[in-house]
Amino acid sequence: MSESSIVVCPQCDTANRIPVERLADGGTCGKCKTPLFAGEPLELKATNFDTHASRSDIPLVVDFWAPWCGPCRSMAPAFADAARQLEPEFRLAKVNTEEEQQLAARFGIRSIPTIALFRNGREVARQAGAMDAATLMRWVRSQR
Ligand SMILES: [Zn+2]
């Protein structure tokens, strides 16, 4: 029996069970047929945050940001670059703290950008301040 991982679809939030050896080529959602890894950060809202943070076996890296924050906007390309390189080992997502104020309050986000790593629904690491792609990837991988 091969091992499998739960991967939550970035499009329809359905939990898919994927054999571990097939994770590398991603696969598609059984429900909506969208690729499970798009190589870009996923936008999370209060309505789907917990599904992606808790149901998925893939650790979740969240960028808490806001449109008015200059350092957040400058970091966006680095975060997208890291998404292309860290998937499918990690899932990268963004939370717009201006639109999702309850999520920002729930996690006590005091400065942005703040990057937090979630595993099985629990926050295991957090780093405030903008990072370039290389620093971000090093930080994420050092949390394993
Ligand atoms: Zn889907």
Image: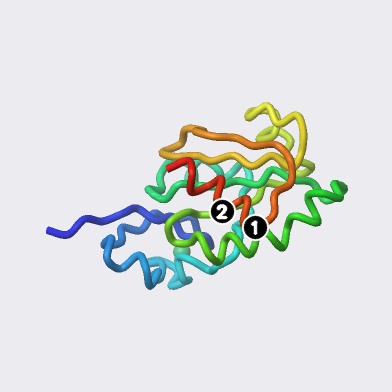
- Residue 29 in the figure: left or right of residue 86: left
Specify the amino acid type for callout 1.
Ala
Q: Nearer the viewer, residue 55 or 129?
A: 129
Name the spot of residue 73 as percent of width and height, x first: 80, 55
CB under 8 Å between discs 2 and 1: yes
Compared with residue 34, is residue 112 higher up or lower down, i.e. above or below?
above
**Element at label 1:** helix
Q: Pointer 2: what residue?
A: 137
Say if 125 sits above or below 58 in the image.
Answer: above
Residue in the foreground of this view, choosing between 39 and 101: 39
Q: Quadrant of the C terminus?
A: top left
In the displayed structure, does residue 133 sit left or right of residue 72?
left
Q: Position of residue 18 (x, y in %)?
A: 30, 61
Secondary element at tag 2: helix
What residue appears at the point 12 percent right and 58 percent down from the top-left corner?
1
Residue in view at x 68 percent, y 27 percent:
108
Q: Residues within 10 Å of mark 2 (few under 14, many from 20)?
A: some
**Residue shown at 63%/30% (left/top)?**
107
Q: Decide: is 122 above or below 137.
A: above
Disc 1: which residue:
133
